[in-house]
Amino acid sequence: MYFCSDMSDSNSYNFQEIEQKWQNKWRENSLYRAEISYKPKYYALDMFPYPSGSGLHVGHPLGYIASDIVSRFKRLNGFNVLHPMGYDAFGLPAEQYAIQTGQHPAVTTEANIKRFREQLDKMGFCYDWERQVKTCDANYYKWTQWFFSLFFTHWYNKSAGKAENISLLVNKFEKEGNSSVNGHTTCTEIFTANEWSAFPAVEKERMLNQYRLAFIDETTVNWCAELGTVLANEEVVNGVSERGGYPVVRKKMKQWSLRITAYADRLLEGLNQINWSDSLKEIQRNWIGRSEGAEIEFQIENSDKKIKVFTTRPDTLFGATYMVLAPEWDGILEICSNEQKGSVEEYINKAKNRSEIERMADTQKTGVFLGAYAVNPFTNKPIPVWASDYVLAGYGTGAIMAVPAHDDRDFEFAQAFNLEIIPVIKPKDKEIESPLQEAFSAKDGICFNSGFLDGLDVSEAIKRAIEEVENKGIGNRKINYKLREAGFGRQRYWGEPFPIIFDDNGIPQLIKNLPVELPNVRSYKPTGTGESPLAAVTEWVNHESGTRETDTMPGWAGSSWYFLRYADPNNTNEFASKESLEYWNQVDLYVGGSEHATGHLLYSRFWTKFLYDLGYLNWDEPFKRLVNQGMIMGEDGQKMSKRWGNVVNPDDVCEQYGADTLRLYEMFLGPLTDSKPWNTHGIEGVSRFLGKFWRLFYKDQELNLSNSEASPEARKILHKTIKKVSEDIENMSFNTSVSAFMVCVNELSTLKCNNKEILESVLVIMAPFAPHITEELWERLGNTNSIHIADWPKYNEEYIRENSFSYPISVNGKTRTQIEFPVDAIKADIEKAVLENEIVKKWLDGKAPKKVIVVPNRIVNVVV
RNA sequence: GCUCGGGUGGCGGAACUGGUAGACGCGCAGGACUUAAAAUCCUGUUUACAGUAAUGUAAGUACGGGUUCGAUUCCCGUCCCGAGCACCA
């Protein structure tokens, strides 16, 4: 920015020249190449980006800078560091961008990747680019398809607590049928070995499909007409698509799904052994949504039909005054009376056609009476059965027992339709209000009106009620999850094709010869009919042994395992060699945004556990430590976006201030995990600091260093900084380390310290943060090896030991003066000296102190 | 509504297991150097009151209580902000 004559002098800080020079040298020497060695490893990973068309803004590199610092720090401390980068190149965003620009996704994706790479290169990251992965490369997605094949050929054995090969299941079916099989399945039919053998192929596959971990599911899906595809739950926000904001409706569809619910409990338990933020773990816990309760069957009056419900509050069974079925409930019309059939059908049809948005916008409960009654098994009284869309078809059994006195929603419904409300739980310390104005839903109370449960508190009553239900043979203890199976098909072009051909019977057959390459087609736009664009490519679809699956896999397929591929990215025989996986192992540090909490981060854990079951990995959590970086907002405090015109481009910052300044500034801004606004003035402060740092080495434009022994003061400053920075990096507290560097340089400048030994150590501890300037000065000091493979200086406590401490002396908790004592002074001497102090005497005002508290090397407090 | 975070100067933010609140940086004010500007350096900067000044006194970490010799830190209640979930029985 300033081109005064002295700026071109080789002895001034010319960051542009320096940064270019070292980025080239590091690349030429493959300085950051990672290879298996005898050294301990450290695996630091960034969430790989979608190569979007708009490039990076200064918010994106925040996490990359942090992981880069940790990687460099670990390398200086003797670790063999794996720090790779790649691109999540398949999926909706890339395809949407291609459609908007009218270019083939393969072309735009390559162009975007190139642009990302240029931007990343300017910031001096220590990635081992030889390990780059792209999810859209055939030699990468070959393995994504292979993993799908594994899911397809495995089932979950609940007795063994792990996934097993489907051939074991077939063996069991052949020998003993399925009654003794304890699989995680939706199959409710029981068959014998003989029956199994007699099944035609289609029927066999229909059964197996109910056990496979990758299976064809007919479910209600989130259908987005504008995007022409099905979306996962987490891709739908407030009833519209996360990307684009288009309306989403519910629709029945056949779809590949992964049976993630088989792993619900393990996904929950695993959270306890990993170092993630509490909030993120909580998000996953909520998403998995485990709840304990009971399933109970209610008999329909004058019928052999039964309704099974799930409840977490069996203690309130005496207060169950009606039942509600979801409109989608199977067999609902068989239960309702002839008189009511017409209005029930009408209600069901209305509910079916209502979009998510409409359902959510509803404040008033709607419903219809079925004209049928069920029997409350505890009171033996008949209770009416209703249908209403406030009951969700997809959770529990799709039916509930309604206890209006103790559930807000049931209360509201009972009020709207004038149904009976019977309180059965009252607060511990008072009588329940009568009549009830709102539901008493607290889990803290005492049962009454409840026969054998009377007088018990809620938690005890729950146990007793379940026992009774089990004794009567009408139900049992049950754990339910909110987690749904993961929809795995997308009706889109830009994704991994399934390695599946449907034979003449419509039975899915695996294609063994991988990869199944994505055909290069001209028209990749969504058809809008619900079919994938691939369905139109007849010469591809029609295969000699049948027809191909034309859906593609979702964006998260490739990202669910990419961290494993980095261990051995060019392997053509395996997704990664056993040896490389064992060495690089789990990701030690994973840095990225929290928006992936219920998507990528959950799916990756699921895949890892599955691969662990199959013996491919010997750990079952992928990311030991996870840190979510915050957002960098625009200077106006709003989210950085083209729309607000507040986007700051890192290229411009590198041009104007240099990459080292950018890196240091982003770290200095505040705690990594916080959101904070960008500030142009702030970056100038950091820029000034680096100028000052440079001048520490120079005097009158000449390198000015002394080889004499360092002064104790300088030593103390250095070692204080070593200690602080080492601790800060481990704690990911980078803002405080930058401030420690500033303090250090300020103090050394004041001392006019030009001691080579001291300054060299300062260079090394600052190298992870500002890799270019430190490397340049390191070279100018006469070093021939890169600073980035030097040794982290050893912290020596002796150098910072003080021999006296200036005690703050407070009277009644308020600091009044300071007195210096030797660090090993004994309490009695300190107390005596303090009481003789003039200022203390003044505050004592002649009175005798009640108490004198002396905390060694901390504080003295005189209590009057 | 529920769950999880969080509220500290004009601003971004420091403060180890309770022990000198406001580190570091920005901004602002004043000064030095310079013909001038840039760059650099120095001084001051929580608020109120008193004093020409050095300085002193009081208040102060969202608000109200509590525990303690001592609370930004621990406990209870209230308010506000952010994030996530949201008819999950």
Image (tube, rainbow, N blue to C red):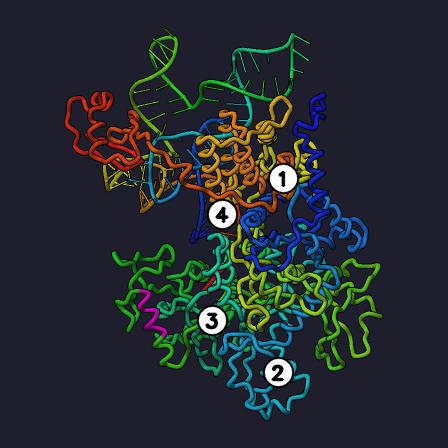
Mark positioned earlier in the residue sequence (4 or 3): 3
Disc 3 with disc 1 on a shared chain = yes
Whole-percent x and y of residue A504? 76, 81
Whole-number angstrom distance, CA of label 3 to CA of label 1: 84 Å
Subunit that carries the residue with mark 2 = A
Q: Secondary structure at mark 2?
A: helix
Q: Is residue A207 above or below residue A551?
A: below
- Name the residue that disc number 1 marks: A783
Question: Of marks 3 and 2, which one's residue comes earlier in the chain?
Answer: 2
Residue under circle 2?
A167
Q: Amino acid at mark 2?
A: Ser
The quarter of the picture where residue A550 lies is bottom right
Q: CA distance from mark 1 to mark 2?
A: 63 Å
Q: Residues within 10 Å of mark 4 (few under 14, many from 20)?
A: few
Picture coordinates of residue A759 (x, y %)?
A: 55, 34
Q: Which residue is mark 4?
A: A730
Q: Please give the range of residues in magenta.
A: A458-466
**Marks 4/2 same chain:** yes
**Element assignment for label 3:** strand
CA distance for labels 4 and 2 = 48 Å
Instruction: Report helix, strand or loop for mark 1.
Output: loop
Q: Earlier in the sequence, mark 1 or mark 4?
A: 4
In the rendered structure, the answer to whether residue A459 lies left or right of residue A287 reads: left
Name the residue rendered at 63%, 77% in the picture.
A209
Specify whether disc 1 shares its chain with disc 2: yes
* CA–CA distance in space, label 4 to label 3: 60 Å
Give the quarter of the figure containing the C terminus of chain A: top left
Looking at the rendered image, the disc whose residue lies closer to the viewer, 1 or 4, is: 1
Crowdedness of circle 1 by 10 Å Cα count: few (<14), some, many (20+)? few
Q: From what the image shows, is residue A84 above or below residue A513?
A: above
What is the three-letter code of the residue carrying label 4?
A: Glu
